[in-house]
């Protein structure tokens, strides 16, 4: 099936292959520091979804250099995206954010800044900062919507409503920033129809790109407790391919599909175990 992949987008924009380097800015999350809760979202790992990032004790520059070293055999162009991935990457004073973002974009090999965050952690002064950085190098903001269904949002302890997401997208787009939305496929209790509704809603909200993430059950999460108690089942390989096929059909051709699967750290993955064979999954999706 033809779709607008992230790789196609990067080659069109930068004229070559570009690789993302995952960075840990040393941030936390309102769902962990007691502002909203202390346990995080029910599926979130101890690393705050930044399990492949470097240590936050390293400087941003050193994390970039370490990331370059890890992928040096996969990329020859020398162009990279600084991806602030772990936890909530706008959840800090503006002065702290400015220092970290600026260090990243000032690196000669970084062509773009990507910031993963929550819609409820985007005060106007932070958006103003992102707009300022966007005048230096392109900025992409990733928002974790996950689902539009209130029952599911409560179960995963998301902590904000749909209007908060809509408002964040509107203000980011008004600032001229690129917006990418995360949707989780396979949340407990959701039907294929429910998942497609979330995808369609996200695509109509004004976003530029979308990430479709298979629900992973990771060790140490509250989701793992429910899974081990037999409260839900994860998607089978065949079910996931069927859902992905229909998702691609409803995503407009101008929206970049950044991800169609995803992989948790293998040492922590409880289910679905088939997802650990990422090459098999990607090959199967390419044949849809």
Image (tube, grey):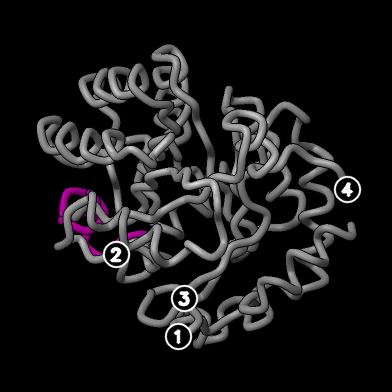
Whether the residues at callouts 3 and 2 have beta carbons within 8 Å, the answer is no
Q: Determine which residue is flagged by label 3.
A: 265
How far apart marks 4 and 3 lie (CA) works out to 28 Å
Element carrying mark 3:
loop
| Label 2 CA crowd tier, 10 Å (few <14, some 14–19, many 20+) | many
Using the image, determine if residue 71 lies above or below residue 117. Answer: below
Farthest-out residue, front: 76
Measuring 51% from the left and 75% from the top, which residue is drawn there? 217
Expressed as whole percent of the image width and height from the top left, the position of residue 245 reads: 83, 52
How far apart marks 4 and 1 lie (CA) works out to 32 Å
**Mark before the other along the chain sequence, 4 or 3:** 4
Measuring 49% from the left and 43% from the top, which residue is drawn there? 145
Element carrying mark 2:
loop
Measuring 46% from the left and 76% from the top, which residue is drawn there? 265
Q: Determine which residue is flagged by label 4.
A: 1
How far apart marks 1 and 3 lie (CA) works out to 6 Å
């Amino acid at each position: 099936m033809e779709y607008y992949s992230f790789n196609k987008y990067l080659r069109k924009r930068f004229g070559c292959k570009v690789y993302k380097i995952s960075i840990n800015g040393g941030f936390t999350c309102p769902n962990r520091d007691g502002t909203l809760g202390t346990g995080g979202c029910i599926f979130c790992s101890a690393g705050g979804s930044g399990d492949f990032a470097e240590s936050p004790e390293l400087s941003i520059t050193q994390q970039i250099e370490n990331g370059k070293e890890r992928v040096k055999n996969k990329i020859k162009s020398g162009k990279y995206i600084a991806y602030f991935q772990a936890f909530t990457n706008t959840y800090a004073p503006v002065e702290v954010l400015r220092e970290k973002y600026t260090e990243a974009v000032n690196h000669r090999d970084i062509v773009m800044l990507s910031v993963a965050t929550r819609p409820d952690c985007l005060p106007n002064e932070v958006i103003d900062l992102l707009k300022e950085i966007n005048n230096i190098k392109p900025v992409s903001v990733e928002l974790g919507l996950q689902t539009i269904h209130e029952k599911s949002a409560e179960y995963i302890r998301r902590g904000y409503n749909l209007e908060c997401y809509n408002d964040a997208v509107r203000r980011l787009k008004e600032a001229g920033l690129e917006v990418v939305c995360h949707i989780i496929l396979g949340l407990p209790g959701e039907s294929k129809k429910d998942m497609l509704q979330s995808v369609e809603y996200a695509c109509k909200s004004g976003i530029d790109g979308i990430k479709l993430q298979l629900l992973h059950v990771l060790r140490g999460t509250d989701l793992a407790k429910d899974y081990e108690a037999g409260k839900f089942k994860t998607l089978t390989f065949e079910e996931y391919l069927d859902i992905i096929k229909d998702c691609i059909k409803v995503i407009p051709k101008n929206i970049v599909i950044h991800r169609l699967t995803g992989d948790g750290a293998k040492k922590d993955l409880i289910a679905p175990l088939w997802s650990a064979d990422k090459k098999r999954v990607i090959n199967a999706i390419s044949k849809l």
